[in-house]
Amino acid sequence: MVPLASVRGRPRSANKKLLVSVRYSPEVIAYFKSTGEGWQSLMDSVLRKYVARHSRGA
């Protein structure tokens, strides 16, 4: 028998994310929210691409 707590919820991701509090300009948030469902994931993707492009030459 498997404990119920280990079966419930979303499976744990190997790619953990951190919870942080960040302030963005209203225009930035409005743009990403206007893209619809998944806007936070889109924002993460855009920031990841920026970091990848700007950290290679460092």
Image: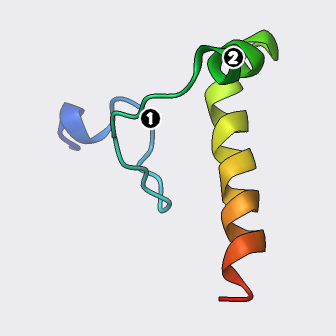
Q: Residue furthest right?
A: 35
Q: Mark 2: few, some, or many residues within 10 Å (few <14, many ≥20)?
A: few
Q: Which mark is residue 42?
A: none
Kind of residue sitting beneath label 1? Arg
Question: Between 51 and 36, which is closer to the camera in this rendering?
Answer: 51
Check disc 2 and report the residue beneath it.
27
Q: Mark 1: few, some, or many residues within 10 Å (few <14, many ≥20)?
A: few
Above or below for 11 versus 23: below
* Local SS, label 1: loop
How far is disc 1 from disc 2 in space, using C-alphas?
32 Å
Across and down, in percent, residue 14 comes to: 47, 62
Q: Is residue 10 left or right of residue 20?
A: right
- Between disc 1 and disc 2, the foreground one is 2
Residue visible at 44% across and 44% down in the picture: 11
Q: Is residue 28 left or right of residue 31?
A: left
Across and down, in percent, residue 3 comes to: 17, 39
Check disc 1 and report the residue beneath it.
10
Residue visible at 73% across and 22% down in the picture: 32
